[in-house]
């Protein structure tokens, strides 16, 4: 794998600016399904939401790197039988220190699928910079045309279920972000895997994540406590004294 090939680019989201919004489109393939189902993973929607909202936030923050503070995604119905997804991000608030973006997901038949919200701030490290928006969009489009997933998303990301309610995600060069920490969308994957392993036979309907600190060393270790449809998940950076990195809440559909 070439260093420029980021893992999330294999999800195939092609993006473009439309007025004040950023739109993305991607095909849905079986490697994106929750294991044992034909349901699109909610963590993939979360990864796409973080991507389109983050690029749009960078439009204001640039050349500083944006940092995700929180991210939530919710679907109206379990995304089974969907062949393509459209995502549209738009600004909800552009403040001096915090930027909030709203995201809407639509299925290929035009039926609303879900919604999301993400908030961002500029990285405290002013030495980290981003390319111009036009260059960033070109890189994103090129990434969407590269190799697609050929194995299930969790396997490709090196995310493993260690026991019921516990999942781990290793650090790798193709999974880090502009701050050289673990990508926020991939953290959604390890949260999802921990929650699903604690409640077999479910898929996620809702995911809300608050990023407390970055995962710098890894692996990211997620532990889920699920009761009924509702789950609480903590993600810790196992390589940094088990510091809590993410506090998440999940809600599930029963298969």
Image (spheres, helix red, strand yellow):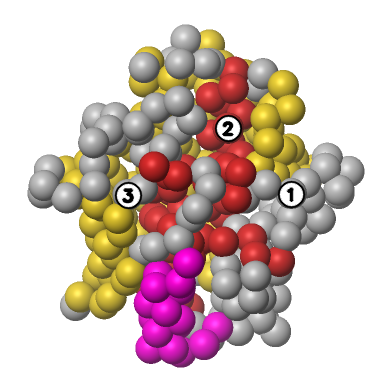
Q: In this orientation, does residue 104 appear?
A: no
Depth check, mark 3 against mark 1: the one in front is 3
Depicted 62 relative to depicted 45: above or below: below
Q: What's drawn in magenta, residue-wise? A: 130-147
* Res. 244 image quadrant: top right
Depicted 58 relative to depicted 88: above or below: below
Most frequent secondary structure within the magenta stretch: helix
Q: Tell me the SS state at disc 1.
A: loop
Q: Earlier in the sequence, mark 2 or mark 3?
A: 3
Q: CA distance from mark 3 to mark 1?
A: 25 Å
Reading the image, the residue beneath label 1 is: 170
Depicted 18 relative to depicted 35: above or below: below
User: At x 57% / y 72%, what residue is drawn?
Assistant: 5
Position of residue 237 measured from the top left corner of the image (x, y, whole percent)? 78, 45
Q: CA distance from mark 2 to mark 1?
A: 13 Å
Reading the image, the residue beneath label 2 is: 193
Reading the image, the residue beneath label 3 is: 28
């Amino acid at each position: 794998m070439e260093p420029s090939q980021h893992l999330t680019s294999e999800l195939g989201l092609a993006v473009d600016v439309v007025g004040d919004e950023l739109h993305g489109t991607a095909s849905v393939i079986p490697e994106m399904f929750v294991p044992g189902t034909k349901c699109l993973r909610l963590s993939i929607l979360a990864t796409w939401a973080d991507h389109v909202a983050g690029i749009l936030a960078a439009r204001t923050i640039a050349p500083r790197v944006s940092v995700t503070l929180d991210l939530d995604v919710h679907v109206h119905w379990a995304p089974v039988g969907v062949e393509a997804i459209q995502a549209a991000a738009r600004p909800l608030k552009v403040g001096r220190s915090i930027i909030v973006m709203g995201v809407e997901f639509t299925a290929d038949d035009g039926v609303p699928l879900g919604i999301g919200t993400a908030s961002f701030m500029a990285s405290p490290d002013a030495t980290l910079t981003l390319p111009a928006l036009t260059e960033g969009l070109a890189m994103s489009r090129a990434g969407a045309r590269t190799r697609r997933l050929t194995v299930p998303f969790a396997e490709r990301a090196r995310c493993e279920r260690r026991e019921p309610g516990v999942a781990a995600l290793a650090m790798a060069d193709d999974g880090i972000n502009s701050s050289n920490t673990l990508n926020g969308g991939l953290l959604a994957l390890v949260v999802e895997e921990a929650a699903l392993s604690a409640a077999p036979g479910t898929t996620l309907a809702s995911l809300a994540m608050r990023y407390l600190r970055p995962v710098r060393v890894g692996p990211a270790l997620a532990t889920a406590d699920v009761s009924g449809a509702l789950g609480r998940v903590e993600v810790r950076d196992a390589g940094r004294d088990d510091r809590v990195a993410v506090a998440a809440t999940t809600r599930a559909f029963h298969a």
